[in-house]
Image (cartoon, grey):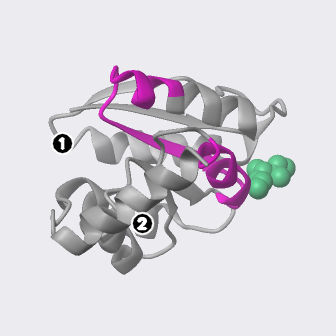
C-alpha cells in the first residue's frame, strides 16, 4: 500500500513519529512535507496529500496539523476524500469499518506519539465492513458532493 503523508508546522515531529510506525507495515511512504518549523498553510498540505489519493497514486493519506481540525476540514472539501479526525483508537477503527475513510487526520499538539501510533496501527489494519447500510450512507456522501 502507498500512503501519502503531510503536515503543517504544527505537527512536523508527529509526522516523523508516524512515519516510524508506518515503517512497521508493508507501506510505501510519500512525504509531501512540510519539513521545517517555518509556518505553512494547512489547506495547501491537505491539497497535496489528497491529490495523491484522489488520483489513485496513493491508496490512503494521512494529514496532520496542530489540532488536526483545520487540515481535516480542508481535506473534506475535496471530492472523493473521506477524512476522519481521530484522537482515539475506537474512532480510528470505526472510520475504516463504517466510513471507509481514505484519509486520517491527527493533531500534533493534541496527541502524544504513543497514542498516535496506536491510532495509526488501528486505522491501517481495519478494513471497511462493506455492509449494505454503510455503502448506502457513503453513497449519500458522494451525492452531497455533487449537489
Ligand atoms: C497553525 O498554527 C494551526 O492553526 C494549525 O496547525 C491547526 O491547528 C489548524 O487547525
Q: Quadrant of residue 121?
A: bottom left
**Few, some or many C-alpha atoms within 10 Å of disc 2 (few <14, some 14-19, many ≥20)?**
few
**Direction right: furthest residue:** 39
**Few, some or many C-alpha atoms within 10 Å of disc 1 (few <14, some 14-19, many ≥20)?**
few
Q: State the residue in front, 101 or 7.
A: 101
61 is higher (above) or lower (below) than 119: above
Numbered tag placed on residue 57 in the rendering: none
Residue at image x 32%, y 73%? 94
Q: State the residue in front, 101 or 124.
A: 101
State the image coordinates of residue 91 (x, y, percent, origin top left): 40, 75
Q: Which residues are magenta?
A: 51-77
State the image coordinates of residue 67 (x, y, percent, origin top left): 70, 61
- CB at disc 1 and ligand 1 closer than 8 Å: no
State the image coordinates of residue 78 (x, y, percent, origin top left): 59, 39
69 is higher (above) or lower (below) than 17: below
Examine the structure image and report whether residue 74 is included in the region drawn in magenta. yes
Q: Secondary structure at mark 2?
A: helix
Disc nearest the viewer among 1 and 2:
1
Q: Secondary structure at mark 1?
A: loop
Residue at image x 57%, y 67%? 111
Residue 68 is left or right of residue 60, and the answer is right
Q: Which residue is mark 2?
A: 114
Residue at image x 64%, y 26%? 35
Q: Which residue is mark 1?
A: 25
Residue 98 is left or right of residue 13, and the answer is left
State the image coordinates of residue 22 (x, y, percent, origin top left): 30, 42
Q: Quadrant of residue 118?
A: bottom left
- CB at disc 2 and ligand 1 closer than 8 Å: no
User: N-terminal of the two: label 1 or label 2?
Assistant: 1
Amino acid at each position: 500500500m502507498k500512503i501519502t503523508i503531510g503536515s503543517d508546522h504544527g505537527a512536523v515531529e508527529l509526522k516523523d513519529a508516524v512515519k516510524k510506525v508506518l515503517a512497521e507495515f508493508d507501506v510505501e511512504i510519500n512525504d509531501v512535507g512540510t519539513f521545517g518549523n517555518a509556518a505553512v498553510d494547512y489547506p495547501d498540505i491537505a491539497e497535496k496529500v489528497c491529490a495523491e489519493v484522489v488520483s489513485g497514486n496513493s491508496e490512503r493519506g494521512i494529514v496532520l496539523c496542530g489540532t488536526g481540525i483545520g487540515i481535516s476540514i480542508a481535506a473534506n472539501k475535496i471530492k472523493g476524500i473521506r477524512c476522519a479526525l481521530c484522537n482515539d483508537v475506537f474512532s480510528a477503527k470505526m472510520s475504516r469499518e463504517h466510513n471507509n475513510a481514505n484519509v486520517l487526520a491527527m493533531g500534533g499538539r493534541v496527541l502524544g506519539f504513543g497514542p498516535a501510533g496506536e491510532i495509526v496501527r488501528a486505522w491501517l489494519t481495519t478494513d471497511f465492513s462493506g455492509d449494505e447500510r454503510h455503502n448506502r450512507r457513503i453513497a449519500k456522501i458522494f451525492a452531497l458532493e455533487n449537489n
